[in-house]
């Protein structure tokens, strides 16, 4: 692991005095790789993801200690603009959450925020993003239709297109397939595999087969701490910790 | 031990009783609305629709016969409008039936004449030549009227259905489209109609931005503290304050306070004649805006609270600032809720009379609250209002019996105006809703 793109140091997070969520997190993420974060519900996976783009700060009473370095720079620095950080670290949520706009406007939303005004450039970038998200062929004739007419799987690929349209360096996926059927899930996984070329991907998932299929690195979380972090193959075939083994073999969690 | 699957407890069950009471409540509400509409229509009918002209004569010699239209029939007495053909007679006559042995006939050739300068006249038609209409009055004296001065005339007792309908339509148009003098003598309600609509629209312009911005601040920026809860409760309670209190407040703050100050600063040369320092359109609109502000704030805030958290987070995650998220996403999505607030505000404002009496409405204003030059609204002038017309005609005027049909007709117009303004807002909300509803499940 040379030169990590993101490095988490001693990160702790709490939502109020009695509600510690994350404790002593150490993690380094390798460029252009897929890192899976697995663990039971409530173990802090999503909260960790939300720390990476500082979305967690929208939650009232959220308190963060420790530091996260992105490209060698602290994301909590006094001069960091969180909106620029979020343009460079995109995120896709658990439930498809397209905006109540047309398909085109959904993908163009981030581009317009970034100040892109030329219709030609917008058209081009929207097409590229939809192509990259493997949705272009299905929506090319109805870009002006409401996003709501798409199926759940298509909506999820649409929000992925929306996230990659602004060309972030890191893509955070928060259980991107948990609300989808197996075929849509498979398409999302293929997509993750292809997107790895251009992006660093962190994916939170419940599904261990999925983690094993798509990720290069895997972290197992339990009770707000990272129990084990290793190469995916190693973690799944030869875990060091008993708790990890228990979890991936389904004995608890 | 088996009980079987039969219904328990006979035919009349609790489930049915609940449904029955709910349905009963709905029927009662709808019936109330329907009855109100029917009463308005029936009572307003004489104002527009041609009514028969009767001739009353008595067997006693000392009683003169009467010719005219019935205004009110109370059983013991008949109130008759006998027109202005003979200036010496009272226009409205009260006929006490007792001891008179009245005989009522319906003269085939009775004529109704609307005279351009004098008003309405009733007589018995004699004939018409090139320039004059000849008729006899109730005493048999002949009158000749110059046709050039007559607006229209017809024989009300021998109208066909079509003629009757066209006269009704013309009367309604006159009623809606013309003004005329003060009191019951006025031809129509046009100035009051314009006054009501202009005042409501002006109020909308004041209340919407103010209410929406206040709601956005309360919901998005204020946080969830003790103070916010206090303010929110206060706003909710403002909606319950009796409207006349707002009137008094508007009079004190806007008319005497702000208006007086404007006069001192900008119109000092014509003091002590007040310009803005007296009740007027601007102050009336502002007072009503204040009155309806809580409604708009509450409705908008509820709309803001319904926006799914997930799409707001999606916007932030794409690098939007708080203001960008608000303007590009939250506000457009809350538009239907804002329209709901607007509907409620209009419904409340268009019907208010009490506060307006203090801050700008008059019984008769010589000109419309519109003008040709900028700002196109006579903001400092008093104006007429349908609700106040109803109150004034029904309870304040000397011949309120004669104005009865007019009161109901005005009430019907106000009813239609409020329904129309509401309908407009509902249609707008429906359009907005259709655009967004799919994603607000």
Image: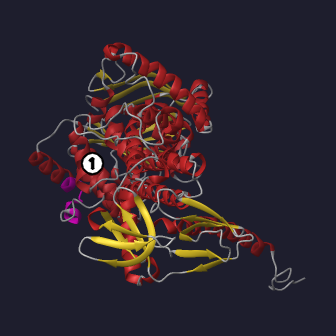
Residue closer to the observer: A65 or B130: B130
Q: Residue at x 26, y 61 (%)?
A: A145
Q: Quadrant of the N terminus of chain B?
A: bottom right
What residue appears at the point 14 percent right and 40 percent down from the top-left corner? Answer: A117
Q: Quadrant of residue B134?
A: bottom left
User: Does residue B264 show up?
Assistant: yes
Q: Residue reaching furthest front?
A: B61
Is residue A82 shown left or right of residue B416?
Answer: left
Protein chain holding label 1: A
Tell me if residue A45 comes above or below residue A251 in the rendering: above
Q: Nearer the viewer, residue A97 or A56?
A: A97
Q: Which residue is pictured at 36% across the width and 63% down the height?
A: B173
Q: Is B425 above or below relative to B124?
A: above
Q: Which residues are magenta?
A: A130-139
Question: Left or right: B127 with respect to A107?
Answer: right
Is A132 magenta? The answer is yes
Give residue B214's position: percent from left, percent from top: 45, 32
Q: Which residue is mark 1?
A: A162
What element does badge 1 sit on?
Answer: helix
Q: In the image, B338: left or right of B23?
A: left
Relative depth, front residue between B18 and A84: B18
């Amino acid at each position: 692991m040379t030169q990590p793109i993101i490095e988490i140091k001693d990160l702790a997070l709490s939502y109020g005095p009695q509600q510690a969520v994350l404790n002593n997190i150490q993690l380094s993420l390798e460029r252009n790789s897929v890192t899976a974060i697995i663990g039971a519900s409530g173990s802090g996976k999503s909260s960790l993801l939300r720390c990476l783009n500082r979305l967690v700060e929208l939650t009232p009473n959220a308190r963060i200690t420790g530091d996260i370095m992105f490209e060698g720079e602290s994301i909590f620095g006094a001069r960091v603009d969180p909106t620029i950080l979020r343009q460079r670290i995109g995120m896709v949520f658990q439930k498809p959450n397209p905006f109540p706009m047309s398909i085109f406007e959904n993908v163009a939303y981030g581009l317009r925020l970034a100040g892109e005004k030329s219709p030609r450039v917008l058209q081009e970038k929207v097409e590229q993003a939809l192509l990259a998200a493997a949705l272009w062929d299905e929506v090319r004739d109805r870009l002006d239709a409401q996003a709501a007419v798409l199926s759940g799987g298509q909506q999820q690929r649409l929000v992925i297109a929306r996230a990659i349209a602004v060309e972030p360096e890191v893509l955070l996926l928060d259980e991107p397939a948990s609300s989808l059927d197996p075929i849509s899930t498979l398409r999302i996984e293929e997509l993750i595999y292809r997107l790895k070329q251009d992006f660093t991907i962190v994916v939170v998932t419940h599904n261990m087969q999925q983690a094993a299929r798509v990720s290069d690195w895997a972290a197992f979380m339990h009770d707000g701490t990272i129990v084990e972090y290793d190469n995916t193959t190693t973690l799944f075939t030869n875990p060091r910790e008993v708790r990890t083994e228990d979890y991936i073999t389904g004995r608890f969690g | 031990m088996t009980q079987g699957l039969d219904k328990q407890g006979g035919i009349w069950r609790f489930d049915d009783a609940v449904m029955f009471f709910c349905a009963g409540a709905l029927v009662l509400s709808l019936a109330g609305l329907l009855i109100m509409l029917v009463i308005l229509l029936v009572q307003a009918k004489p104002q527009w629709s041609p009514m028969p002209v009767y001739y009353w004569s008595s067997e006693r010699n000392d009683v003169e016969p009467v010719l005219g239209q019935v205004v009110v029939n109370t059983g013991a007495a008949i109130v008759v409008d006998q027109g202005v053909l003979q200036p010496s007679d009272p226009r409205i006559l009260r006929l006490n039936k007792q001891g008179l042995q009245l005989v009522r006939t319906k003269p085939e050739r009775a004529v109704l004449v609307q005279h351009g300068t004098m008003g309405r006249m009733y007589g018995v038609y004699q004939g018409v030549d090139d320039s004059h209409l000849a008729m006899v009055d109730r005493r048999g004296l002949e009158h000749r009227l110059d046709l050039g001065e007559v607006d229209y005339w017809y024989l009300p007792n021998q109208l066909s259905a079509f003629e009757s309908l066209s006269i009704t339509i013309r009367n309604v148009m006159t009623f809606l489209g013309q003004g005329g003098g003060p009191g019951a003598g006025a031809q129509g309600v046009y100035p009051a109609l314009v006054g009501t609509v202009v005042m409501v629209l002006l109020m909308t312009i004041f209340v919407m931005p103010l209410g929406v911005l206040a709601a956005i601040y309360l919901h998005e920026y204020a946080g969830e503290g003790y103070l916010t809860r206090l303010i929110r409760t206060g706003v909710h309670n403002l909606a319950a304050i009796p409207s006349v209190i707002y009137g008094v407040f508007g009079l004190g703050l806007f008319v005497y306070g702000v208006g007086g100050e404007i006069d001192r600063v900008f119109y000092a040369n014509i003091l002590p004649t007040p310009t803005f320092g007296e009740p007027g359109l601007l102050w009336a609109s502002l007072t009503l805006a204040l009155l309806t502000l809580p409604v708009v704030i509450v409705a908008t805030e509820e709309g803001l609270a319904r926006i799914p958290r997930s799409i707001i987070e999606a916007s932030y995650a794409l690098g939007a600032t708080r203001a960008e998220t608000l303007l590009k996403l939250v506000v457009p999505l809350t538009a239907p809720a804002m329209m709901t607030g607007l509907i409620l505000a209009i419904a409340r404002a268009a019907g208010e009379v009490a506060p307006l009496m203090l801050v700008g409405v008059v019984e008769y204003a010589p000109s419309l609250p519109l003008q040709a030059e900028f700002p196109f609204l006579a903001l400092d002038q008093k104006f007429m209002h349908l609700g106040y017309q109803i109150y004034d005609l029904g309870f304040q005027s000397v011949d309120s019996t004669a104005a009865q049909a007019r009161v109901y007709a005005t009430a019907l117009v106000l009813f239609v105006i409020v329904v129309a303004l509401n309908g407009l807002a509902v249609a707008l909300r429906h359009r907005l809703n259709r655009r967004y509803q799919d994603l607000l499940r």
